[in-house]
Amino acid sequence: MQNPPAPKLSMAQVLACGAFIVTLSMGIRHGFGLWLQPITQAQGWTRETFAFALAIQNLAWGFAGIFAGMLADRFGAFRVLLMGAVLYALGLAGMALSRDPFVFTLTTGVLIGMAQAGTTYAVIYGIIGRQIPPERRSWAMGVAAAAGSFGQFLMVPVEGFLIDRFGWQQALVMLSFVVLAIVPLAFGLREPGFGGGVAPKREQTILQALGEAFKYPSFQLLMAGYFVCGFQVVFIGVHMPSYLKDKGMSPQVASYALALIGLFNVFGTYAAGMLGQRFAKRKILASIYLGRSIAIALFLAAPLSPLSVYLFSAVIGLLWLSTVPSTNAVIANIFGVAHLSMLGGFVFFSHQIGSFLGVWLGGYLYDRTGSYDIVWYLAIALGVFAALVNLPVREAPIARGTVPQAA
């Protein structure tokens, strides 16, 4: 006997529960850069050791996100969110207790990466796509992305305070309990049509949907652009605190900088969602990537001071996750929402490959050259590349049975 379907979800319920989940999951993640120096100094590790664990985290997040999306599309997001919350708590506790680089990589990298796959955008955007009308979808995705940005603004100073007040290990243990708040929030996202593990009927199988998407040029271009997004934001998020400390800045400047990125990204992601209702999303994406390159170039050229750091953080914050609602809204427009979590997961995997390279190269090249300069310059060049590849994206719904070329 099948369980009765959950009550129909209202827009307010979807946005409130989804936003709080993303706030917790993304907010905790954005503060990981604050642990780089305390952990490496306490354990006697190189920065590359820490960076490699976070690089694996990004790869695990991206790879697991594909399967988390498949499961959410098939069985509903509720079960995926519960498992993600438990893995997140275990991973944070393991991060605090690990004494060996290999174990640290397994907990910080693999466990937390899998947890993020089940508690962030791919899963939440699948719910939004299925529960919110198309004419409000871009806006709603912007709200969810803005929530992740608010999480950074809220959680990074909290994490900095916990480290200063209780030490890095106790701070991680405390966060492992905080993240379990996702569990009650997940009950607010039990979708109708998934009772008893029976998903709504779809026109395509998973293999058909994947074959269609990967043969479609615009899907490939979105993946290429998202690769650059991952490279830029994870390199900055993880390594900028250490970059600033190397330049003589206080740890408080780094904490405020990350918090400012989160605060201004609230406005940037919401604005991107709103603009996506009126303008071509490909042009919005191209503008965001080009704007990032300009902001990084000006930051490196200007004399470094707390003011220049805060100005850069505000500008880059406006452009930080504003790619997320636009990219996912384009995927929903082209392919529909039946396999949105899965297809979004594949595009996000490309993002995470970029994240792997951004965070790992930052640590690798720093240990060998004593500087982050090469990676900063790579971030500028890749931003220009991403702007160019997003311009030919075709946003119109795909005509089933044909494979039109990019515009």
Image (spheres, rainbow, N blue to C red):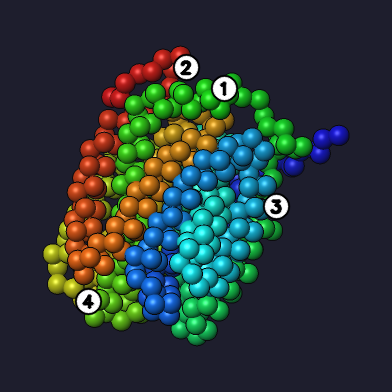
* Mark 1 element type: loop
Q: Residues within 10 Å of mark 4 (few under 14, many from 20)?
A: few
* Mark 3 element type: helix
Point out the frontmost of discs 3 and 4.
Answer: 4
Q: Please name the residue that numbered disc 3 is placed on.
A: 187
Residue 185 versus residue 12: which sits nearer the camera? 185
Q: Please name the residue that numbered disc 2 is placed on.
A: 400
**57 to the left or right of 203:** left
Mark 2 or mark 4: name the one nearer the start of the chain: 4
Mark 3 or mark 2: name the one nearer the start of the chain: 3
Residue 362 versus residue 3: which sits nearer the camera? 362
Amino acid type shown at disc 1: Gln
114 w.r.t. 368: above or below: above
CB within 8 Å, label 3 to label 2: no
* Mark 2 element type: loop
Where residue 308 sits, quadrant-wise, is bottom left
Amino acid type shown at disc 4: Lys
Q: Which residue is rendered at x = 53% and y = 70% of the image?
A: 98
**Is residue 109 visible in the rendered structure shown here?**
yes
Residue at the right extreme of this rendering: 1
Mark 2 or mark 1: name the one nearer the start of the chain: 1
Give residue 199's position: percent from left, percent from top: 68, 32
Q: Please name the residue that numbered disc 4 is placed on.
A: 247
- Marks 3/4: CA–CA distance: 46 Å
83 w.r.t. 67: above or below: below
206 w.r.t. 354: above or below: above
Q: Which residue is rendered at x = 45% and y = 30% of the image?
A: 333
Q: Please name the residue that numbered disc 1 is placed on.
A: 204
